[in-house]
Amino acid sequence: MMSATPTTPTSEYMQHVFMKQRAAFENDRYPSAADRVERLMRLREMILDGQRELQDAVCRDFGNRSLEESRVAEIAGTLAAIAYNASHLKKWMRPRGHHASIWFLPASNKVVAQPIGVVGIMAPWNYPINLALVPLATAFAAGNRAMIKMSELSPHTTEVLSRLIRRRFSEEEVVVTGGDATDSAYFSSLAFDHILFTGSGKVGRMVMTAAAKNLTPVTLELGGKCPVIVDDDYSISEAAHRILWGKTFNAAQTCVAPDYVMVPKGETSAFVEAITKHYSEHFPKGAQDESYTSIIDHSNFARLNAMVDEARAAGATIHVVERPTAKLAAARKIPLTLVLNPPADSRIMREEIFGPLLPVIEHNGLDDALRRVRKGEHPLGLYYFGNSGDSRRQVLQKSLSGGVAINDVMLQFLQVDLPFGGVGGSGFGQYHGQKGFETFSHLKPVFVQRGMGSFTGLKLLYPPYGPIARQVIKLMGG
């Protein structure tokens, strides 16, 4: 049974580790704040010592992954989350007082945050370090053990991360496993106390179905078509500049990447001109530059090209800011490609793109743009560029999305104290910061009554029910 390794797990190995963690939790059901901080500091040191190995492994998995993007999203973002959890967990652990009704005085109420046990984390390939270790840091802050299942598309990262974890942590604390879709299915069937899954809606539904057999609560971080609305009082050039960053960072293989943009009627040409200019400034060597990330594999490369071909055949105008070459194709690199006025029923407007293709359509005002957003599933992120406070309020009130960024894109994800999560088709449940601590805790309500011999208001309602009891019940509204 134990011939398996974390990177090539068997069901027996995963069950073995799960039972070890369950037993360890039973022996230490409420780790002290000091113990939790110590685990977080070990995690921090592991990342600092192994950051170059981790960055190189991610690059190998992608074929080419911008070093700077890995440093920002994978290393800096993860370290920031660890530091925030470590500095705030003592406060989060304190019992929180709650109001007690006058009829039950002198009782008091409080809520106690209790560790739940063993957490299952299913991390995707697009940000394999951040989306594995930020949830782990949150689970540690809440006092739990964790098992992490990595994507089969990130084998090099899985191997390095698993090895680094084993150097610093016991299997009773955390283990990182790899494996294929079959292993993922078994992993999600384990009787975890909570599962956090990040990935596609299709797989998310499968995870939820498997978890339901154990009544395991699930947090699903999915994705969807994150829209951008540019209003007529905002600079087209500046909006294009900021959107370009989000649409080329990690080659837009990001769940909160801008998926399509709506510009004011008549502004398409200006937008195309501006984003093309900014692209040449950001990537003077074009997509061949090392700072431009590759598409993860041939399957996704082919999928994206098929989307463009289908949109062209359906009547959309295709504007490629840089001519594709055989050399770029060999490196699985797709230059930023603008798809102008694609039909609403085209594949590129129905499916999450997850790549550097940007549909551009025109709107007839903010109400029209918001109507278009509401026709689709609720997105994970919504981006609005505009200066009017009243228009911003309309965007917030007349749309439903996992999160919103005003006058920028994607940065809501990097805010360590903002809850992150989807709604409807983009997922449910939240983590990051205190919300993550609460997600991986049981918030236990506790009612405390005075000791024996003391008078309590409830004794007025003990039978036999006389005039006083009836009057009290009447005053209570009964």
Image: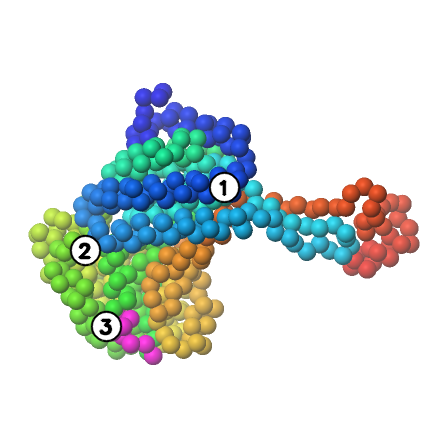
Q: Is residue 165 above or below residue 411?
A: above
- Per the rendered image, the range of residues in magenta is 233-240
Write the residue at 55% across / 37% down: 30
Left or right: where 463 falls relative to 50 = right
Quadrant the N terminus occupies: top left
Image quadrant in which you'd find residue 384: bottom left
- Left or right side of 69 for 141: right
Is 237 in the magenta?
A: yes
Dominant secondary-structure state across the stretch colored magenta = helix
Q: Total label count?
A: 3
N-terminal label among 2 and 3: 3
Mark pair 1, 2: CA separation: 40 Å
**Element carrying mark 1:** helix
Q: Evaluate if marks 1 and 2 touch, with contact meaning CB atoms under 8 Å apart.
A: no
Name which residue type carries label 1: Ala
Badge 3: residue crowd in 10 Å (few <14, some 14–19, many ≥20): many
Q: Quadrant of the C terminus?
A: bottom right
Which one is closest to the eye, mark 1 or mark 3? 1
Q: Which mark is residue 271?
A: 3
Along the line of sight, the residue nearer the viewer: 215 or 278: 278
Q: Which residue is tagged 1?
A: 34
Q: Amino acid at mark 3?
A: Phe
The answer to whether one can see residue 359 in this image is no
Residue at (66% x, 45% y) in the render: 446
Mark 2, residue position: 291
In the rendered image, residue 335, in percent from the top left (x then y), is placed at 17, 58
